[in-house]
Image: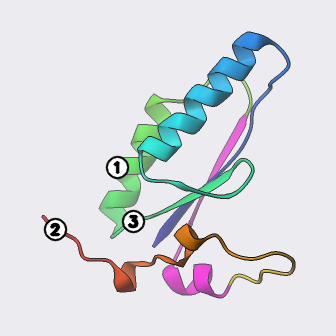
Amino acid sequence: MRLIVMFDLPVITEEEKRIYGKFRKFLLKDGYIMMQYSIYSRVCKNSDDVEKHVNRIKQNLPDKGNIRLLQVTEKQYNDMLLLVGTKAVEEEFSIDNMIVLE
C-alpha cells in the first residue's frame, strides 16, 4: 500500500519558503520519497500504518497551501503509467521486496 502526498504551498516570502522547507524535510524524515516536485510517496504495510502516517501529516500541516493525500494499493501504484522520464531508484521499492522487523 502507498500513501501519496501532493502539495502546493506558497513560497513567495522568506517565511513561506522556510515553512515549505520544513514540511518537505518532515516528509523525507518520515520515509517519503520524492516522485516529482511536491509529490511524495511512502510504502505503508497496512491500513493502521496509513492512519498513523496520516495523523503525523496532520500534526505537521502548514497553515497555508493545499495538501492532498491519496492511498493506493501496490498494484495500482505499479500500474501507474510513466509517459515521459524515468522512475527514481527509490520508487522501485515495494512491500513485496521489503523486510519488516518488529
Q: Which residue is mark 2?
A: 101
Question: SS at mark 2?
Answer: loop
Image spot of residue 76 (x, y percent): 60, 83
Whole-angstrom CA distance, mark 3 to mark 1, is: 10 Å
> Label 1: few (<14), some or many (≥20) within 10 Å?
few
* Residue marked by disc 1: 52
Dot 2 crowding, Cα within 10 Å, few <14, some 14–19, many 20+ = few
- Left or right for 83, reference 33: right
Residue 88 sits in which quadrant? Answer: bottom right
Name the residue located 47 percent from the left edge and 76 percent from the top edge.
93
Residue 70: say if magenta. Answer: yes
**Mark 3 residue type:** Cys
Tell me the kind of residue under disc 2.
Answer: Leu
The x and y percentages for residue 36 are 73, 58
- Give the residue displayed 33% in from the left and 70% down from the top: 45
Image location of residue 69, percent across then percent down: 60, 53
Say whether residue 39 is left or right of residue 94: right
Mark 3 against mark 1, which lies toward the viewer?
A: 3
Magenta segment: does it hold 60?
Answer: no
In the image, is residue 9 above or below residue 82? above
Return the residue found at the far left.
Answer: 102
